[in-house]
Image (spheres, rainbow, N blue to C red):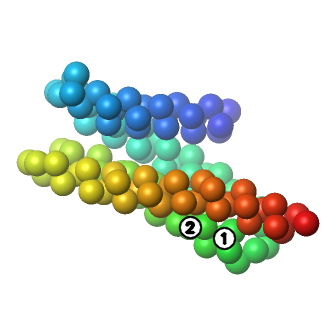
Amino acid sequence: MINILYYIGALLLLLGAASRLFLPQHFAYIYSVGAVLFAVMQFITRVRSRSVAVRRLVRQQQLAGVLFIAAGVAMFALQHNEWMVLLACGAVVELYTAFRIPNELDKENR
């Protein structure tokens, strides 16, 4: 169930950011719902690892979720496209941790 909500949040995040061109009056709402759902699932999901590196990477992943939510808030609060900077920073951190966490877990299991 958590994985399904996680994927729904990610899909809404992507659709909200992409629909800026097609639904300019509704894209912020779609994105914000997806960002909150995605971030909440990141905070709920627990990685059972004793490795300091994995715990650090999970905290970085949670920071990316906070950046996604901040981008959603910026869509409503700011007048221009400043939210794109927050979205880009969150995406870079999320991409980095998405590759590093499985790598570190494999190292730990060996």
| Furthest-right residue in this view | 110
Q: Is residue 6 left or right of residue 18?
A: right
Q: Which corner quadrant holds the C terminus? A: bottom right
Q: How far, Cα to Cα, is label 2 from label 1?
A: 6 Å
What residue is shown at x 66% (from left), y 70% (from top)? 55
| Secondary structure found at label 1 | helix
What residue is shown with label 1? 55
Q: Position of residue 31 (x, y in %)?
A: 34, 37
Figure quadrant of residue 43: bottom right
In the rendered view, would you say 42 is above or below 32? below
Q: Position of residue 75 (x, y in %)?
A: 21, 45
What residue is shown at x 70% (from left), y 77% (from top)? 52
Numbered tag placed on residue 59 in the rendering: 2
Question: Do tag 2 and tag 1 residues touch (Cβ < 8 Å)?
Answer: yes
Q: Nearer the viewer, residue 13 or 96?
A: 96
Work out whether residue 77 can be spotted.
no
Q: Which corner quadrant holds the N terminus? A: top right
Work out whether residue 88 can be spotted.
yes
Q: Is residue 6 left or right of residue 104?
A: left
Q: So how many labels did they put on this image? A: 2
| Secondary structure found at label 2 | helix
For badge 2, the amino acid type reads Arg
Mark 2 closeness class: few <14, some 14–19, many ≥20 residues within 10 Å: some
For badge 1, the amino acid type reads Arg
What residue is shown at x 61% (from left), y 73% (from top)? 56
What residue is shown at x 21% (from left), y 27% (from top)? 21
Q: Position of residue 23 (x, y in %)?
A: 22, 23
Mark 1 closeness class: few <14, some 14–19, many ≥20 residues within 10 Å: some
